[in-house]
Image: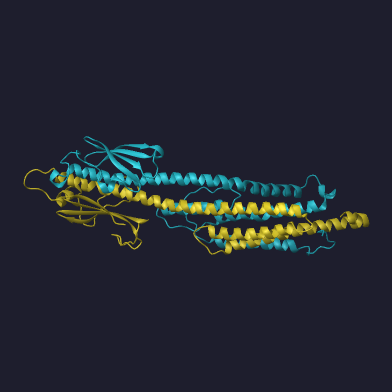
Chain colours: A cyan, B yellow
Amino acid sequence: MSQRTDSPEFAPGFIWQIILLTVAVLCFAVYSRSQEDSTPRMGVKSPISIFPWMMGGKQTIENGLRAFSGKPPEPPPIDDRVRALGPLLISMVLCPTVFFLEWRRRRLAKASLLQRTPWSMSTAFYALCGLVTVLVALVVGPVAYFGENARENQRHAQAVQTNRDFTIDELNLLAMDAAQYNILPRQLGGGGRSFVGYSVPETKAKTEEASYTVTEIRNVVVFRAASSKFPLCAVQVKVDSLGHMRDWVYEGEFR
Amino acid sequence: MTEKKQRGAPFMEKNTVTIEIKQEVSITLLWIVGGVIIVTLVFLLTPSSMDLWPSLNAAGIAGVVYLIAMMTYALRKPMEMRVRAWIGIAAIFVLVLGGFTWVRMQQESEFHAETLIKVRGIIGRGIMLYGLREPPVKTLDEFYRQRGSRKESLADIFRKQNSGAAVGTNIHKPEWEGDQSQVIVAKLEPAMIELLSQETYVKGRDPQFKNHNGQVGMIQEKVILTEKGITYVSEN
């Protein structure tokens, strides 16, 4: 069945009324949300993207940063809401609708002379909407693929960093242990102002994070921590008689 | 259109074409306006939260429903079956991939936000340990350097090294602007000194743990100094 009709189905002002209603609803929504608190926020640059999920991610990370700094989370401000809603409407409503309905019309009309107008505003708009729709459809695959790769890399980097931080914390404890060994008299199991005889306590020699060994004992003690999770990663540090740590050397991905 | 051209007069033909275009534009506009209203209302009416995700997800689902309805309309007969099938499959493929990326983005951002808090906890413990470690080591060092029969107690040496130290005082000297670390003297007895440090907003392992300052569930670390050495206790 063709879409052609000899009589209009809508009163002349109907479409404009609908458009005005839409604008009014949007304005009302924007106004009502603008009453929300608008205190200064943690600065995460707003991503410019046709993909609506970018703004969602930005907001979540922003609240994560706030929690990092000891501040309470904040609801998304109105401009972030608009930035999230805009791409959603463009990529899921406006562009696909214009593209597919116009494409259908052109396909079914078999391109009569009148509809083959070489260049007009509507043709340009149709082309733009088509471009956005096709681009979004084509790009979403690579975005998913490369996004997965990037995620894996990020998680790996994060895991390495966390392992390194925990290892440093445990080395701090060992530094205190070595210092007190140096200080305590031999009668109390210490070294009597010497590191000679010091070894990493059995309970601390192997943890979930790393294996700890003493590689050198002179006027300082040198600890080496080999990561339990990332075999090529290690960290080495010198500890003096008061537990001061210096000359850190990082190996592998800990660098 | 061709039929019209064949049977209609030129005047009628022009009228018919004008009406036809207007109607198609009207239908397109109606779809757009309907879609904008539905998606916007769903987005704005979703209960407010600290994240955009609930609103985005709800509006995204509304958008997908709208897209399916609009495409069903656009691909209806007399469109050839072959074209409908290809475009339908492509649309499903794109929607699934888009949905997948969307969900993964949400998971990823939540993971990073949680990681930030976790990292803050690790850094916090590291800073506390650094602050807690030094005073008892110094005190113990001086205690065992004493010669002669009359020896000062651990508490005496500790007070001498940290002027004004008393139970409940903070002996940490800020090392940078904004350094809010605290090393609190929890016990100061001749042969035993307890120092503790706590976070004021980073949660520890036990959410029910009662902190020194009256808060609940925050990270708290402690060191106990006796003549036999230093004991480190990760309290929460």
B93 with respect to A247 (left or right) = right
A201 with respect to A187 (left or right) = right
Horizontal and vertical percent for residue A107?
79, 51
Q: Nearer the viewer, residue B47 or B205?
A: B205
Residue occupying image coordinates x 19% and y 53%: B193
Residue occupying image coordinates x 31% and y 62%: B210
B233 with respect to B10 (left or right) = left
Q: Does residue A252 appear anywhere in the picture?
A: yes
| Residue furthest left in the image | B149
Query: Is A195 placed above or below A51 here?
Result: above
Q: Nearer the viewer, residue B49 or A160?
A: A160
Horizontal and vertical percent for residue A178?
23, 43
Horizontal and vertical percent for residue A146?
56, 44
Residue occupying image coordinates x 13% and y 46%: A187
Q: Nearer the viewer, residue B142 or B115?
A: B115
Q: Does residue B176 appear anywhere in the picture?
A: no
A222 with respect to A37 (left or right) = left
Query: Is A208 placed above or below B167 here?
Result: above
Horizontal and vertical percent for residue A5?
83, 61
